[in-house]
Each structure stands twice: as structure tokens, then as C-alpha cells.
Image (spheres, helix red, strand yellow):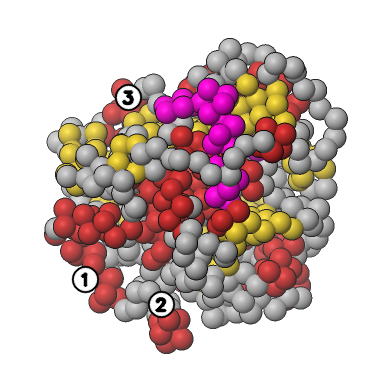
Amino acid sequence: MARPTSAAARGLRVLKPSADFQRQARLSGLAAYKRLHAESLRAPDTFWRRMAEEHVVWRKPFHEVLRWKPPHAKWFVGGSLNVAENCLDRHLGTNRENQAAIIFEGEPGDVRTLTYRQLHAEVCRAAHVLENLGVGKGDRVAIYLPMIPEAVVAMLACARLGAIHTVVFGGFSPDSLKDRINGCHAKLLITADGGWRRGKIVELKSAADKALEHTPSVQAVLVVKRTAQAVTMRSGRDIWWTEALAGAPNSHRAKAFGSEHPLFILYTSGSTGKPKGVLHTSAGYLLGAKLSSRYVFDLKDNDRYFCSADIGWITGHSYVVYGLMSNGATVFLYEGAPNQPGPDRFWEMIDRHGLTILYTAPTAIRAFMRWGDEHVLRHRLDSLRLLGSVGEPINPEAWHWYHRLVGKGRCPIVDTWWQTETGSIMITPLPGATPLKPGSATLPFFGVAPRVVDERGREVGPDQDGKLVITRPWPSMLRTLWGDDERYRRTYFGEYGEHPDWYFTGDGARRDKDGYFWIIGRIDDVLNISGHRIGTAEVESALVAHPAVAEAAAVGKPDDLKGQSLVVFVTLKQAAVATDELREQLRAHVAREIGALARPDQVRFAPALPKTRSGKIMRRILKDIAAGKPVVGDVTTMEDVTVIAALQDAC
Ligand code: 7RM
């Protein structure tokens, strides 16, 4: 039986789109959404043909919409295009030409604007430089840069040449960089001397130099000067970006590439083993990113859009670069930390630049809550019209805070569910159309056919927990894992023998009576306590609803009696004090909110939780710690490895 949790109960308040928002929305009214979604599933060929013709600039038209030999899909067969041309050249000669493509602000406060014309010129110059270094179609290029305009330029220059980029987040260690370069045998590395983070320099070049001792495929290194401290330049290998670009022409004739030509590889951590190189290709990916950006963010010409995700994450690829720029949007790019120089940096920038859309992650929202309301309240935030969330289930507590404090009750929140593998947003509200339920990612995007099923693939009833699968291919789906098609098959299409065409997401979910999806989290994170299935997210959501708690992570510890016992790790708000009394209060609080079966066996106060670079809690590490085992497995994606020792000491 389904247990209606208090989190779900709190979420039952439905927020209809306001008349003001609806009046100006690209898609207003649930009926309009339902009509389009139904068509996209009833006649996918017609639907996708129309979308692809309308939204993609083709060099050569495609003759077949989809060729599907599970688990391999080919979209828009026979067509050719240039993805960079789709993001840049198409805007030249239109009134977008002199509109800002990028408004950049560095952490120290330096501001730089590039119009579409200027960005085009930079990308053309970079494309020439890459070509002169011998980079061409199908070659791999690693990009290891801070969040600066050159990161966008580098990606689009690769796309222009048909080279495959692999962006490695600037916070990764030399070892992680090395593994990713070697994973795809990159020929060129594009990096910088450093980047700014919390007032300090992140030494990218010296980290890269360490990695480069063990990367025989790399022939040349382009180095952007950002922080200007002394770095070692190895002659014959290292070249300053600015010097190289200075002599290059600012126009470039772009070649066309087939629809299925690889666009990028993005490494993402599996729960065990080495990171997976998710491969995305050109036309389908571009269409997915473009269409979803337009409808989910309700993009308009005068929007100034801010996505706080780093470019080294899929969100940066799809919703900073490809989706936004193919739409000709103005993107605000920020280099640094959200609390530098103070905890109100985002709010201050939103006011100063008149930003209209903010897309961020629940982990960031919970940090803002922890830092205190006063930092938000000091700013007007009246330019904002739409808010977005991605990366984790957003707990209703954080949802309401975001809605009230940041959105002033005026801005819809799009809670967008998707994955590195899906390439673009899959389950999401459309802000002028979808009534919102806090904590639910709501309904599927066009062409997306999700289902919640049990172990045997049978659809479960309303409000029942199950596994989330996608039962049809969609244009922006991953095509394989680089160099390991077998792992691709096994991981994503091997779950249900009878349905070799179902994509397995690895997430648990339930669907309510209105068809709304509630994502519970990774299936590996579901606990089984005395035979009761409890989602870690439910327990965590209950904990963070307590006034003393900033963040929480729940894990199971092997238990002879119960199967698993429940251990929770908790970080406290600044004003709260860790006492045994509070520990008891929290146990009672969870029992009250969810039920006695979810009363934590152990509450451990921690200075910080282990997270990935993109802010997701790494529960498998906490599982090892709870069980008193040494931490094993891949920690290369971890934000701060010193957290492990601190947790092992904490009690
Ligand atoms: C975009 C991104 C994917 C995993 C996914 C989920 C979780 C992401 C939401 C979410 C609940 C959301 N790519 N996830 N968005 N869970 N609600 N709106 O995050 O590859 O890094 O992660 O993230 O578990 O499977 S990702």
C-alpha cells in the first residue's frame, strides 16, 4: 500500500499558472500542452518531422525521421547540418546579431558582453586555430576551463569542425582529468592558467600539467590567460590562446556533418567502476535542447537567462550553450562561488543585470536557506519572472522558500527531471500551462513516454513506488557509452527482458492520480527497513523541514534483524547546536512525519555531506561510513574528499 507521506501531502496544494504569466506564455493552458503531447506520441513521425524542419537549420534535409533498432537509434537519417551554425550563423543578419549572446561576470567583478556577432567571430577564430593544430572531424578535444566565455567558444569551435568535445569540470583533480583524456584519446587540451573561486585561484594549468604526464594522445595545449599568475609553458606543446587567436580570420566556412555525427562525450560517474562516457550526437540532441529551452523556460527576446550550473555538467551543455544559443537567447554566465564576496552574490547580480530567469539546483537553494533570509530580502529581484530547479528532488520546504523568497510568489518554478543520458529535459512543467505541485516534476515533455513499473515491467497503480522507464526513443537520447557499447546495453536497456526497447533510468518514482510524476531518487538509494520500502528523499525531506536542519542524507546500514537500519547524517543551520536532545527530537520528528517505521536508528551530526561537483549527495559513501567500512569506489567526481575523514570522525 502507498503511504501518503507528509511531504507528498504538503505538495498537494496545487498552484495554477497566474493569469499574468499565462497571458504572455508561449504555451498557455493545460489543454494546449495535452494536445501537443498527445500528438507527439500518436504520430511521432509527423510531430518530429515538423519540429525538426521548423527548429533546425539543415544543410541537407533528412529523409527518415527515426531508425530504431533497439537499443540503437538514428534520428533524422540522411540529413546534414552544422551545430555551431545553428547556434550562431543563423542569428547573423537578424535583429539578434547585435544582441548579447553572453553577459559574463567574473568572480572578481569584471564584466564582459559578447553579442552574437562577436561570439561568432571568436568561434570562427578558434576554429581556424584548432584546424591549424590538426583538429578535424571526429577528433576529440578536452576542455578544462573555468566558467568563462572561452569555454563556450571552445565548445562551439569544436562543434563547427565536427570535432568531439569532452568538457571536464574545472574543479576535477589531475587524476580525473587524466582518466577522461585517456578514455577518449583527446588530441588537444584547452585549459586556462586558472580560475577564480572564493577569492582564490584554482590552478588549472598546474593541475593539467600533472595530468599531461600520463596522456600520450595530447599533442598540443591551448592556454587561456584568466588569472595571470605565473605558469609553466612547455615549448612545442603549450600555446597561449590569445596569441593564437589574434592572427586568425574572424570568418570560417563551416562544413556540414551528418545528423548522427558525434557532438560530445560527457563523463558521468556510475555508482561503481570507472566513469561512463555518455555520447551525444548532433541533430537530435540539438533539437531536444532547443525545443525544451524554448518551452520550459518560455523564452522571449528580452529574457536574460541565468543558469548557475557549470559548463562541465550536462546542464551547462544543454541549458547554457546548445539549447539557449540555438534559440538566440541572452545567457548570463557567472564564474565564481554564490557566496563571494557575500552570501547575496546571486541576488545582487540578478538586480544589477536585470536577470529574468534563474535555473539552479536544490543543493544551492538549501545553502541559501541556511545562510539566512536577510541576504535575499535585501534585494528587489523584480526582474525575475521564472525559476527552475534541477539535479535532485526538490523538497517542498525548499520549493516554498524558493517560491516565496526568491520568486516573491510571482514566478512559476519549473522542476525539471532529466539526466546526462537523456540530453534534454524529460519531465517538467511548462510554466504557462501546467498547474504546479511542489516536489513534483509534473508531466512529460513532448515525445516523452515515461512509465512507472515493478520488477517485472508491469505498470504500478497511482501513488505506488516503482522504477521509472522511458518506453520510446527520443531525439536527444544518448547513443552509446564511448568505447563500451556493451555497458550501454546492459546499463540502460538490459533491465526488462521482455522490453528490450525500454530505457531504464535508474530512478525510482511514483505517479499520482493526476498523472504527475514524483521522482524519489536513484533506486540504489531506496531503503528496505523491516520489509518497508522507504525513499531516502522522504526521510531527508522530513528532516530538512525541521528548523534546526540545513541538509540531511539518509542511508541504510546492514542489520541482522531489520535487513537495514536507518542512519541519517545531518548538517545543522548556523544557529543550531548539536546535542543529544536535538538528536532525539529529530528521531521523533521523522517518526511523526513519516511513521514509526522510518524512525532513524542513528542520527549523526556532520560538518558537511559528501557531494558530487554538481551538488548531488553521494549516498554510497555515507553507506560505507555508516557501516564502518573503508570508503571504496570512484571518488573522482567528489567535490571535496576531505569531507570523508570529517564524517568518519563525526558521531
Ligand atoms: C540534469 C542532471 C541525473 C539524476 C537523475 C535523478 C536526479 C535530476 C531531478 C532529479 C528529481 C529532478 N543530470 N535528478 N533532476 N531528481 N527531480 N528535477 O541532473 O546526470 O547529473 O543526474 O539526477 O536521480 O537520474 S545528471
Which residue sits at x=18%, y=64%? 39
Along the viewing direction, whichever of 401 and 425 lies nearer the viewer: 425
- Which residue position holds label 1? 35
In the picture, measured across the screen, residue 305 lies left or right of residue 596, that is right
**Dot 2 corresponds to which residue?**
25
Q: Could you tell me if the residues under marks 1 and 3 are in contact, i.e. CB atoms within 8 Å?
A: no
For marks 1 and 2, give the CA distance. Answer: 16 Å
Furthest residue in direction bottom, as rendered:
19
Comes first in the chain, label 1 or label 2 = 2
Q: Is 317 in the magenta?
A: no
Q: CA distance from mark 3 to mark 2?
A: 42 Å
Quadrant of the rendered structure where residue 454 is?
top left
Q: Look at the image and tell me whether residue 115 can be seen.
A: yes
Whether residue 6 can be seen here: no
Q: Residue type at mark 1?
A: Arg
Residue 184: image location, x then y, percent: 48, 22
Residue at 74% across, 52% down = 106
Q: Earlier in the sequence, mark 3 or mark 2?
A: 2
Helix, strand or loop at mark 2: loop
Give the class, few, some or many, for how many residues have Cα within 10 Å of label 2's Cα (few <14, many ≥20).
Answer: many
Q: Earlier in the sequence, mark 1 or mark 3?
A: 1
Q: How far across and how far down the image is residue 600, in percent?
A: 55, 49
- 631 to 313, vertically: above or below: above
Indicate the secondary structure of the residue bearing disc 3.
Answer: helix
Q: Quadrant of the C terminus?
A: top right
| Numbered tag placed on residue 485 in the rendering | 3
Left or right placement of residue 323 versus residue 364 in this view = left
Note whether 606 is above or below 137 in the view shown. below
Segment tinted magenta in the rendering:
119-145
